[in-house]
Image (cartoon, rainbow, N blue to C red):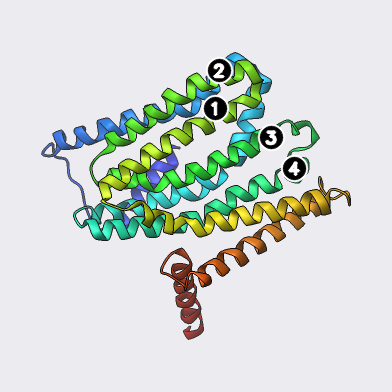
Amino acid sequence: MLAGRLTATILSYTMHPYRPRLSLEAAGELFHFSKWLLFNNILIFFNNRGVDFVIGKVGGPQALGLYSVAYEISNLPTTELVFPISRAVFPGYAKLAGDLPKLRAAFIDVLSLIALVTVPAGAGIWLIVEPMVYVVLGAKWVEAISLIQVLAVYGVIRTLHGPTGSVYLALGKPRVISFLHLVHMAVAVPLLILFMGRYGIVGAPWAILGAACVSMPVNYAKALHELALPLATVVEAVWRPLTAAAAMLFVGSWIHSRGLTPMGLGQNLGGLLILITAGALIYLATVIALWRLARCPRGAESIVLELAKSRLSGSASR
């Protein structure tokens, strides 16, 4: 950890001309902003680990182990894709904070790109979970399958939460993030105790999903208000990836239940590879078809195509 922080500090000096010097001139402003960041980090800890405390207390170590593994797998799109993207776009948001139209446009571009990549990733985890558990974890983890499926839905919702946090920080309103964490905790903890008392460990992911379903509308109502952004614009940015992911789940589930399972491929590496390939092809074909039917509007698809063309033309010229 120390080596990582030291390396990052050295790199910051080599990559940017800004040279800070010791001064207390902005101490008040800095403390006012950073106190909310500290509070947010505390709330993030309790949101993530508080669930573990409750599950460990109510369900015991075996239940906590099942939930922890299920959570890590199902939320890979968020931790490995959305968080790095959010960190990368924050400086850009901060520069645009004084220009609301440009900030709105940047937010929609980032949201559409995140939806295009992470929604199928989360849906794909739901689709391939059975053969994946048998191949990667082994038969002893079979009880985690149902937990991963529910948490995969939560993971998709969490990915769509991601871009809003950087917007609040860029606008100088970190307290909004604190409020949203408190809303999530206020719903998640009572539901967790209630559902686990009735249904055991199976109830835990449903409690977390229920809390996300409450906090997400609150989050987007606030974000749309801050950006003066109509809901229709957000829907336009995400409906194609959501629809294509639903098609992937429908057709992929049919392939798994009607084709792979009767052939004995539902729980092995061959079935896993077939499902991954089929799911990817179905999603890509559907999202491209929907984009063409919508007459190729500007969005994540056009941005990806523009990037691909620029990279290919650059490679060709070199």
Q: Is residue 159 above or below residue 175?
A: below
Please name the amino acid that badge 1 sits on.
Ala
| Label 3 to label 1: alpha-carbon separation | 14 Å
Describe the element under mark 4 as helix, strand or loop.
helix
Viewer-closest of 198 and 159: 198
Amino acid tagged 4: Glu
* Residue type, mark 3 in image: Ser
- Dot 2 and dot 1 residues touching (CB under 8 Å): yes
User: Secondary structure beneath disc 3?
Assistant: helix
Residue that numbered label 2 is attached to: 194
Separation (CA) of disc 4 from disc 3: 9 Å
- Please tell me which of labels 3 and 1 falls first in the chain: 3
Residue 79 in sight from this viewpoint: no
Q: How far apart in space, not on screen, are marks 2 and 3 (Cα)? A: 19 Å
Q: Secondary structure at mark 1?
A: helix
Q: Amino acid at mark 2?
A: Leu
The residue singled out by tag 3 in the image is 146
Q: Residues within 10 Å of mark 4 (few under 14, many from 20)?
A: many
Task: Quote the CA–CA distance across marks 2 and 1.
Answer: 9 Å
Give the Cα distance between marks 4 and 1. Answer: 22 Å
Residue 130 image label: 4
Give the farthest residue toward the left: 25
Marked residue nearer the N-terminal end (4 or 1):
4
Location of residue 260 with respect to 37 vertically, above or below: below
Front residue of 295 and 22 = 295
Neighbours of disc 1 within 10 Å: few (<14), some (14-19), many (20+): many
Q: Can see residue 202?
A: yes
For label 1, the residue is 207
The residue at 13%/36% (across/down) is: 24
Left or right: where 268 falls relative to 201: right
Label 4 with label 1: CB-CB less than 8 Å: no
